[in-house]
Image: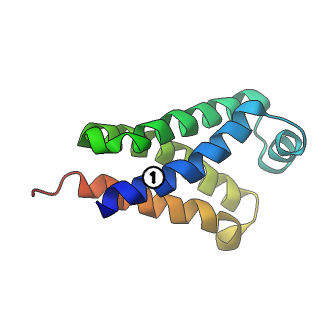
């Protein structure tokens, strides 16, 4: 039960961020382009991966496969985000949020391989 609540928490947080990236509106797009050297098309791809991965996490109660697919999709985006934060010179403080969700997602992914 806790794993599904964790998936819902991560899914909700990532869904909101993914939609903002897909919309690519206003300041967020300019900030990503200048700070992280990411163009708008790459940002939209990341947003779609986050949004679709979040949807898989929301329905993770239907089976382990949904959790695995969702975590891989989201962790791919988070891994790049962590790398980009370090490359931009933000260090741990800049990538703290991405690291938190990456860790929670990784725990959820590992839990799918546990025998019950």
Residue 107, image quadrant:
bottom left
Could you tell me residue 105's position as x and y percent? 42, 56
Q: Is residue 116 above or below residue 24?
A: below
User: Dot 1 surroundings within 10 Å: few (below 14), some, or many (20 or more)?
Assistant: many
Give coordinates of residue 47: x percent, y percent. Answer: 64, 36
* 64 lies left or right of 80: left
What residue is rendered at 55% in x and 50% in y? 12
Would you identify the image quadrant in which residue 77 lies?
top right
Look at the numbered disc 1 and give the secondary structure of its residue. helix
Q: Nearer the viewer, residue 24 or 58?
A: 58
The residue under the point 72% across, 38% down is 21
Q: Is residue 89 above or below residue 71?
A: below
Quadrant (top left/top right/bottom left/bottom right) for the N terminus: bottom left
Q: Judge left or right: residue 49 versus residue 113.
A: right
In percent of width and height, residue 16 lies at 65, 46
Residue furthest toward the bottom?
Answer: 93
Report x, y in % for residue 8: 45, 52
Residue that appears at 69% across and 58% down:
85
Relative horizontal placement of residue 66, taking residue 24 as reference (left or right): left
> Closer to the camera, 88 or 42?
42
Q: Which residue is mark 1?
A: 8
- Colouring style: rainbow
Residue 54 position (above or below residue 1): above
Q: How many marks?
A: 1
Quadrant housing residue 15: top right
Task: Classify 86 as above or below 22.
Answer: below
Residue drawn at x 60%, y 57% is: 82
Q: In the rendered image, which quarter contains the C terminus? A: bottom left
Q: Which residue, as the protein is rendered here, is positioned at the far left? A: 116
């Amino acid at each position: 039960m806790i794993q599904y609540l964790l998936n819902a928490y991560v899914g909700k947080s990532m869904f909101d961020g993914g939609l903002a990236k897909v919309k690519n509106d206003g300041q967020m797009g300019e900030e990503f382009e200048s700070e992280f050297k990411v163009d708008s098309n790459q940002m939209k791809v990341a947003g779609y991966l986050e949004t679709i991965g979040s949807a898989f996490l929301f329905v993770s109660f239907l089976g382990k496969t949904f959790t695995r697919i969702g975590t891989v999709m989201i962790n791919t985006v988070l891994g790049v985000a962590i790398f980009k934060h370090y490359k931009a010179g933000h260090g741990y403080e800049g990538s703290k949020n991405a690291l938190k969700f990456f860790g929670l997602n990784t725990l959820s992914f590992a839990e799918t391989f546990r025998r019950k």
